[in-house]
Image (cartoon, rainbow, N blue to C red):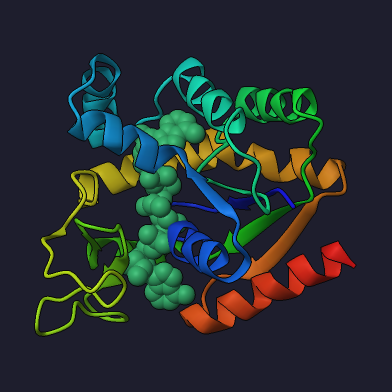
Amino acid sequence: MNIILLGPPGAGKGTQARHLVDGRGMTQLSTGDMLREAKDSGTEMGQVVADVMAKGELVTDEIVIGLIREKLQGEKTAGFIFDGFPRTLAQADALGALLAEQGESLDAVIEMRVDDEALVERITARSTCGNCGEVYNDKTKPIPADGVCSNCGEKAEFKRRADDNAESLKQRLMEYYKKTSPLLGYYYAKGQLERVDGLGDISEVQSAIAGVLDATAS
Ligand code: AP5
Ligand code: MG
C-alpha cells in the first residue's frame, strides 16, 4: 500500500509516518529528511538547498523528484509513506508517473487537518533526537529527563530545526497554502482524498489513520 500524508508544517506527518513504519513495516519517504541529510553531509546539493530551506521556501521540483525517483528504485517493502512529497502539482504528476513505471499505484492520500494556531505551537516546541530522528515536543512529548531517547535508548543530542522559527514558519505556511493545498482538489478529483482530524492527541490521530488504511485495504 502506498500513501501520501498531506498537511501543513507541524500537522504531524513525520510523527504518524514513524508509527506506520513501526506498526506496518512501511517505508517512510520524507523529502524534508532527505534534504536535511544532504545538508548535514555537506554534499553540493545540500549546500544549494540549505539556504532555501532555512527561509522556508520550496526547493526545486527537479531536486525532490530526483530524490524520490532514486528511492522508488530501491527494495520493495510493505509500501511507501510519502511524507512532505508531493508539494506541487508538478511533483504530484511526477509521482504518478514514477509509481506507474514501477508497476505501483497510490492507494490513499490522507489530509491531516490542523488549525494554524496549533501548528505554530507545535513547531516552536519541537525537537528531534540527533541519533534516530524521534520527534519530541516540549509540551506534548517532552525529552526524557535523563536525556536518553525513548526510541533508540541512546543519550543523544536533541536538535531544533533551523527552519523552526516564527519567520520561516510564516513562509512555510504561505508556501503550503499557495503551492501544496491545490493538491487537495487534485486528489479529491481522482477519488483518492481522505481526511483525518490532526488536532487530537497523537494516539487518536494514529487510530484515525489506521481506520482509513484498513478501510482502503478491504
Ligand atoms: P519538511 O521536513 O517536510 O517539513 P514540513 O512539511 O514543514 O513539516 P514538518 O516536518 O515541520 O511537520 P510534520 O507534519 O512532519 O510534523 P511533526 O510530526 O514533526 O520540509 C522542510 C523543508 O524542506 C521545506 O520547507 C522545503 O524547504 C523543503 N522540502 C521538503 N520537501 C519538499 C518538497 N517535496 N518540495 C520542495 N521542497 C521541499 O510534528 C510537529 C510537532 O508536533 C512535534 O513536536 C510533534 O511531537 C508534535 N505533534 C505531532 N502530532 C501531534 C499531535 N497529534 N498532538 C500534539 N502534538 C503533536
Ligand atoms: Mg516532518
Q: Is residue 79 above or below residue 98?
A: below
Residue occupying the far front of the picture: 75
Image point (28%, 58%), residue name:
132
- Res 119 quadrant in image: bottom left
Q: How far from the left and from the top, in percent, is residue 147?
A: 11, 76
Q: Quadrant of residue 37?
A: top left
Q: Residue at x 84, y 63 (%)?
A: 217
**Left or right: 167 as drawn, with respect to 104:** left
Q: Is 187 situated above or below 195?
A: above
Nearer the observer, 150 or 190: 150
Please tell me which residue lies in front, 69 or 212.
69
Q: Is residue 36 left or right of residue 202?
A: left
**Quadrant of the rendered structure where residue 205 is?**
bottom right
Closer to the camera in the image, 56 or 160 = 160
Q: Say if 79 sits above or below 100 in the image.
A: below
Residue 142 horizontal/vertical position (percent): 23, 80
Looking at the figure, which quarter contains the C terminus? bottom right
* Number of marks in picture: 0
Left or right for 61, reference 193: left
Q: Residue at x 34, y 33 (%)?
A: 35
> Is residue 66 visible to us here?
yes
Q: Decide if residue 172 is in sight here.
A: no
**How far from the left and from the top, in percent, is residue 3?**
68, 50
Residue located 11% across and 70% down the image = 155
Above or below, 201 relative to 178:
below
Q: Where is residue 68 shown, x and y percent of the image?
A: 54, 29
